[in-house]
Image (tube, helix red, strand yellow):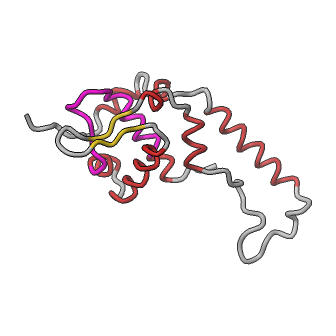
């Protein structure tokens, strides 16, 4: 299974915010996240909006603004974040496209793939952001360029 780029970016944004905490010197903006993660600003903005809608981060504007985790964001399950960004769809689209699979009504592969997908999510459910930013990951995340605010 391959994660969508937006899911990958959402997890990396949350991990970065988990290690920076409430320190206003390293609170990144969406534009800085996009630059640091080398993704288009519009893609980063869409991911940040999704995380904000989920209640996992706050996006503050203006001087002293930036992105910060919320309380629920700090305790968020990695599985829940991945589910939210990946959606509920099947791993394979048996009935879509120009030519639906002729086996779709009696195929055991589809069910096996669905069970594998759920096992994947269940394995991520107990993980939190705190689990993802322990040594050695946390210090590496702090090395990703951020912004130094003017005094």
Q: Residue furthest bottom?
A: 98
Q: 92 left or right of 9? A: right
Q: Please name the residue shown 72% across and 58% down the image.
A: 92
Q: Please name the residue shown 26% across and 36% down the image.
A: 27
Magenta range is 10-31
Q: Assign the C terminus to one quadrant of the image.
A: top left
Percent x, y of residue 34: 32, 51
Q: 21 left or right of 92? A: left
Q: Nearer the viewer, residue 27 or 92?
A: 27
Q: Nearer the viewer, residue 149 or 71?
A: 71
Q: Residue furthest top?
A: 135
Q: Residue furthest left?
A: 151
Q: How many marks?
A: 0
- Quadrant position of residue 126: top right
Q: Please name the residue shown 31% across and 46% down the image.
A: 33
- Asked if residue 70 is positioned above or below residue 43 in the image, the reply reads above
Q: Is residue 136 magenta?
A: no
- Quadrant position of residue 71: top left
Percent x, y of residue 112: 81, 47
Percent x, y of residue 93: 72, 62
- Asked if residue 19 is positioned above or below residue 59 in the image, the reply reads above
Q: Nearer the viewer, residue 140 or 101?
A: 101
- Asked if residue 24 is positioned above or below residue 96 in the image, the reply reads above
Q: Please name the residue shown 60% across and 36% down the image.
A: 79
Q: Nearer the viewer, residue 102 or 89?
A: 89
- Quadrant position of residue 63: top left
- Asked if residue 25 is positioned above or below residue 89 in the image, the reply reads above
Q: Is residue 16 magenta?
A: yes
Percent x, y of residue 121: 65, 38
């Amino acid at each position: 299974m391959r994660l969508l780029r937006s899911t990958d970016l959402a997890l990396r944004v949350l991990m970065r915010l988990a290690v920076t905490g409430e320190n206003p010197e390293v609170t990144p903006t969406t534009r800085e996240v996009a630059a640091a993660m080398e993704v288009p600003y519009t893609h980063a903005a869409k991911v940040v909006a999704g995380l904000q809608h989920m209640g996992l981060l706050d996006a503050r504007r203006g001087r002293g603004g930036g992105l910060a985790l919320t309380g629920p964001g700090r305790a968020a399950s990695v599985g829940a974040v991945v589910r939210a960004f990946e959606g509920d769809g099947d791993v394979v689209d048996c009935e879509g496209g120009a030519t639906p699979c002729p086996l779709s009504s009696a195929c055991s592969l589809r069910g096996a793939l669905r069970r594998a997908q759920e096992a994947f999510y269940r394995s991520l459910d107990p993980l939190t952001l705190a689990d993802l930013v322990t040594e050695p990951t946390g210090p590496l995340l702090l090395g990703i360029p951020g912004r130094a605010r003017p005094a």
